[in-house]
Image (cartoon, rainbow, N blue to C red):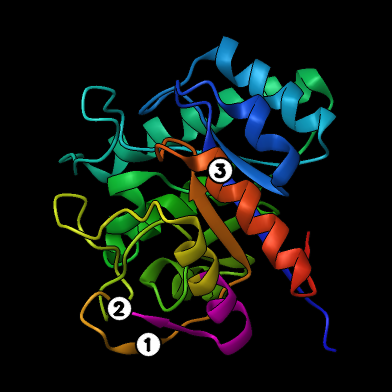
Amino acid sequence: MKVRSIDVNADVGEGVGNEMLLMPYLSSCNIACGGHAGDIESMTSVVRLAKSNQVKIGAHPSFPDRLNFGRTVMEMSPSDLYTSLKAQIERLQVVADAEGVVLNHVKPHGALYNLAAKDEGVARVVLKVLKAVNPLLKLYAPYQSEIAKMALLNGVEVVYEAFADRGYEDDLSLVSRVKKGAVLHDKERVFNRVLRMVKDQKITAINGVEVAIKISTICVHGDTENAVEIVKYLVCKLKENNIRIQ
């Protein structure tokens, strides 16, 4: 039987407080670094947890918008966005250096992630920040997104990401959180769709259309209500199906 592998990640350090329960099942994590959530204390705590569980560490920058948890697009000039994102990632870099660990990747959060997937200007800013901080950092981004395409053209390593617990439109954008079916809570349904993404490189959109997809990492949102239950079940079932978590 062919052995496949997948990275399992979660967005953490966002004030939920379930990191200790999530970490044993993750192979990478995305740490909020002050934009939508997080401060030096939370970053330090989560970095230490990740280190002790041998989980790869990534920065999870966002629009500087704690009020809306970074899930609303902010009108910002490219220079202001650049300054904010660079400061966020560097804040986590300082913590990582102090704890003797390296940053593995950058994954934008929320509205920034979705906008960079389709807006060349925003994507360009994110990539400019990444290369300024450390050009060896990987980018977690959606398959066929503008930012992924631009990253590859600019020598940035891309790790294609999909979401275990989110609904998809047929253009591979995420279903808006205000719509029914945007967030999935059924652990068996989550596993079955992830297995299909890994083995068949396909996903069924919310309108029933089958769409081709490529993934190297799968995300379970740390703030999904039953995130720990989902990721525990998902990892267990993936391993049962000869899929290595790495």
- Up-down relation of residue 213 to residue 185 (above or below): below
Distance Cα–Cα, label 1 vs label 3: 27 Å
Report which quarter residue 168 is drawn in: bottom left
Image point (70%, 26%), residue name: 47
Report which quarter residue 115 is drawn in: bottom left
Type of amino acid at the residue the image marks with label 1: Val
Residue 114 tag number: none
Label 3: how many Cα within 10 Å (few below 14, some 14–19, many 20+) = some
Label 2: how many Cα within 10 Å (few below 14, some 14–19, many 20+) = some
Q: First in sequence, mark 1 or 2: give its number.
A: 2
Residue 205 tag number: 2
Image point (19%, 40%), residue name: 72
Asked if disc 1 and disc 2 are in contact, CB closer than 8 Å, the reply is yes
Q: Could you say where residue 97 lies in the image, as x and y percent from the top left?
A: 76, 24
- Up-down relation of residue 10 to residue 40 (above or below): below
Q: Which residues are magenta?
A: 194-204
Residue annotated with mark 3: 229
